[in-house]
């Protein structure tokens, strides 16, 4: 029965949670060879306890979370080293020992729980019990982490929902209104009016499609699954074609200044992904400032480049806008997810995705001040055929 199993688990846990007699000699076994390297590489705190409840090992992250050095904690009874309480003020050890309340203890341990150290420091604690062949407790392993990562994930989720809802509302409202009007009053509109309304619907549909694409790319960047399919391509031609499309969309010819260096080295990149990079940076420059958008494609020598494997030249894409610029204190956050930069509009995903695309090509991207006072985005990509696949 579940109740009996839980009681047995609690009673078993009590065996190793009971404090050893005061002054008892505690033999601390040496670490297994190689264990420090493995444990200390883990981002979460790990504490290993033997059956009598004393600490036999812990990693650097656990030292940091508990605020005490390893040498001081080894051999110490766990309930002294970690006087944890649950959020109701009960001592964790008492909850485990007495089986009182929703401890969630089983024969194998318990799942992640929010517990408090003295002073209110929050820890997420997971326990795993390792048993001998006869069922007795051999050792236990605790995983410790702060709730910060969980809170960041929750904040990201909330921000994502708010961003998507905000960005979808406007185009979907427009599509709904225009299609409803066309369906109800088709015969009342002239061909020119119909063309204008359908063009607006198409533009809004493309806007939604771009948002969905950005969301998918964000998921790929976060998961480390953003792939690129490289082949020889002409970055300068790609930039020219995008600027020409903007001119055909109604922007003045004088708005854009395009400079391309002669004899550019060969670039191996994914044309579709590089089109995203160019579109994001140039369109971003157009939105932020009514003045000239300067786009330059140039080359850096091997000594200057320091991108990729650092062994060759780099092709450089520079995009300057004529806006207010980005203050130096904000620049470290520009490529963060959901960063808007005060009055800057948009989802806050474009530059995050752009950095992921550039880095997937072995390049780098940064932001600085443009000569005219606006923002300058600089992309450096390794030239030539990549050594790997």
Image: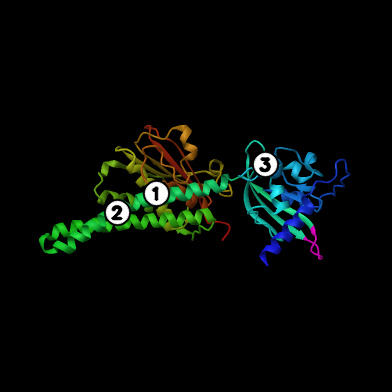
Q: Is the residue under label 2 in contact with that under label 3 (CB below 8 Å)?
A: no
In magenta stretch: residue 257: no
Q: Main secondary structure of the magenta part?
A: loop
Image position, residue 70 (x, y; %): 77, 41
How dense is the environment of label 2, judged by Cα within 10 Å: few (below 14), some, or many (20 and up)?
A: many
The vertical placement of 242 against 73, above or below, is below
Q: Is residue 63 visible?
A: yes
- Say what secondary structure mark 3 lies in: helix
Q: Is the residue under label 1 in contact with that under label 2 (CB below 8 Å)?
A: no
Q: Is residue 96 left or right of residue 321?
A: right
Q: Nearer the viewer, residue 315 or 102?
A: 102
Q: Earlier in the sequence, mark 3 or mark 2?
A: 3
Q: Nearer the viewer, mark 3 or mark 1?
A: 3
How far is mark 2 from mark 1, CA to CA? 13 Å
Q: Is residue 42 visible?
A: no
Q: Which residue is tagged 1?
A: 163
- Say what secondary structure mark 2 lies in: helix
The vertical placement of 63 against 95, above or below, is above
- Say what secondary structure mark 1 lies in: helix
| Residue 65 marker | 3
Please state the extent of the stretch shown in magenta in the rendering: 131-137
**Residue 209 location, quadrant:** bottom left
Question: For the view shown, which residue lies furthest in the bottom direction?
Answer: 1
How far is mark 3 from mark 1, CA to CA? 34 Å
Image position, residue 370 (x, y; %): 40, 35
Q: Earlier in the sequence, mark 2 or mark 1?
A: 1
Q: Is the residue under label 1 in contact with that under label 3 (CB below 8 Å)?
A: no
Q: Which residue is tagged 2?
A: 171
């Amino acid at each position: 029965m579940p109740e009996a199993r839980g009681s047995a688990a609690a009673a078993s846990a009590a065996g190793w949670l009971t404090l050893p007699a005061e002054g008892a000699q505690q033999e601390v076994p040496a670490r297994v060879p190689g264990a420090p390297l493995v444990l200390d590489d883990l981002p979460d705190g790990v504490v290993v306890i033997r059956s009598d409840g004393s600490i036999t090992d812990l990693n650097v992250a656990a030292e940091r979370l508990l605020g005490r050095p390893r040498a001081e904690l080894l051999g110490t009874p766990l309930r002294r080293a970690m006087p944890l309480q649950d959020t109701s003020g009960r001592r964790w050890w008492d909850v485990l020992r007495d089986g009182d309340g929703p401890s969630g203890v089983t024969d194998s341990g318990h799942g992640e729980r929010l517990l408090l150290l003295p002073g209110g420091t929050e820890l997420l604690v997971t326990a795993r019990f390792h048993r001998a062949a006869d069922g007795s407790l051999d050792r236990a392993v605790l995983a410790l982490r702060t709730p910060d990562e969980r809170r960041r994930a929750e904040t990201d989720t909330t921000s994502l929902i708010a961003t998507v809802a905000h960005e979808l509302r406007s185009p979907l409202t427009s599509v709904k209104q225009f299609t409803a009007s066309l369906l109800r009053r088709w015969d009342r509109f002239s061909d020119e009016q119909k063309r204008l309304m359908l063009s607006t619907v198409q533009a809004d549909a493309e806007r939604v499609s771009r948002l969905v694409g950005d969301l998918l790319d964000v998921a790929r960047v976060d998961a480390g699954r953003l792939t690129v399919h490289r082949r020889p391509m002409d970055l300068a031609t790609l930039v020219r074609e995008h600027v020409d499309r903007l001119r055909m969309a109604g922007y003045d010819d004088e708005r854009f200044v395009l400079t391309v260096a002669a004899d550019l080295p060969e670039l191996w990149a994914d044309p579709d992904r590089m089109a995203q990079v160019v579109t994001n940076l140039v369109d971003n420059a157009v939105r932020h400032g009514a003045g000239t958008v300067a786009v330059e494609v140039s080359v850096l020598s091997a000594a200057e480049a320091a991108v990729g494997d650092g062994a060759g030249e780099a092709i450089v894409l520079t995009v300057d806008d004529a806006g207010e610029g980005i203050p130096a204190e904000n620049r470290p956050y520009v490529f963060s997810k959901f960063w808007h930069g005060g009055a800057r509009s948009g989802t806050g995903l474009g530059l995050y995705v752009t950095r992921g695309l550039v880095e997937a090509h072995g390049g780098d991207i940064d932001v600085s001040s443009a000569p005219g006072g606006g923002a300058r985005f600089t992309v450096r990509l390794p030239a030539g055929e990549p050594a790997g696949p």
